[in-house]
Amino acid sequence: MTPELPAGVERILFTEEQIEHRIRELAAQISERYKDKHLKLIGVLKGSVFFMSELARRIRVPVKIDFLAISSFSNKSGAPGLVRIAKDLDDTIEGEDVLLIEDIVDTGFTLRYLLQTLSSRGPNSLAVCTFLDRTSRRIVQVPVEYRCFEIPDHFVIGFGLDYNQLYRNLNYVAVLKTERVG
Ligand code: IMP
Ligand code: MG
């Protein structure tokens, strides 16, 4: 019954059909909220690309897209939470209605940094839509307006999410076979 799974896959959490269904629901909510507006979707490279393209295709208001990339690192004592922009947006966001698209919100450090940076650029509005949300590991509180799925405390891959840059192209979300340490 189960088709062969790639070596790194422990089990499938969300199938292609479940993902598509949730994305349609979110797109409908977003289209309603931003009706009469133009919406700018900002994707955080690279993880959000797959989710963002599926979502954007189903949103019923005029959409612009832009991307940024960040890199996160730990300080000398190993504390997480240091983030910087590795590739900035192509355009300004001043006066625009911005929806920031994330692959997953975990501790919240990345999102907090991005929200601080983007809000200082004067958008008309700024909200967050994440594909996955792991609230059980949250360290800093961040506002998440839209999310596809809440997930348990396992490292996940697929539909944009990677392990050592692999598995982003899986058409589903899966738990990685070797649980991460720490
Ligand atoms: P945060 O700053 O701890 O919220 O980290 C969020 C970032 O860590 C995400 O944008 C991902 O790039 C990465 N990440 C966190 N959990 C996972 C996971 O389960 N699979 C793949 N990447 C993850
Ligand atoms: Mg990310």
Image (tube, rainbow, N blue to C red):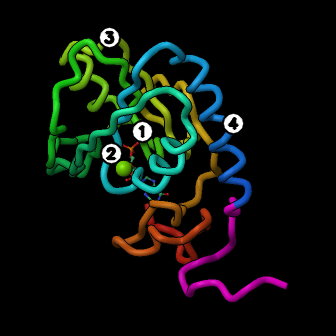
Per the image, the residue denoted by label 2 is 44
Q: Identify whether 18 is placed above or below 118.
A: below
Beta carbon at label 2 within 8 Å of ligand 2: yes
Q: CA distance from mark 3 to mark 2?
A: 20 Å
- Sequence-earlier tag: 4 or 2: 4
Residue with the mark numbered 3:
124
Q: Position of residue 169 (x, y in %)?
A: 47, 70
Residue behind mark 4: 25
- Mark 4 burial class by Cα count in 10 Å: few <14, some 14-19, many 20+: some
| Residue type beneath disc 2 | Val
Mark 1 and mark 2 in contact (Cβ < 8 Å)? Answer: yes
Vertical placement of residue 69 versus 92, above or below: below
Which label's residue is closer to the chain start, 3 or 1?
Answer: 1
Is tag 2's residue or tag 1's residue first in the polypeptide sequence?
A: 2
Q: Which structural element holds mark 3?
A: loop
Crowding around mark 3 (Cα neighbors within 10 Å: few <14, some 14 to 19, many 20+) is: few
Residue 136: percent from left, percent from top: 58, 40
Q: Amino acid at mark 3?
A: Asn
Q: Earlier in the sequence, mark 4 or mark 1?
A: 4
161 over 85 or under it: above or below? below
Question: Which is more foreground, mark 3 or mark 1?
Answer: 3
Question: Is there CB contact under 8 Å for labels 4 and 1?
Answer: no
| Distance between the alpha carbons at the discs numbered 2 and 1 | 6 Å
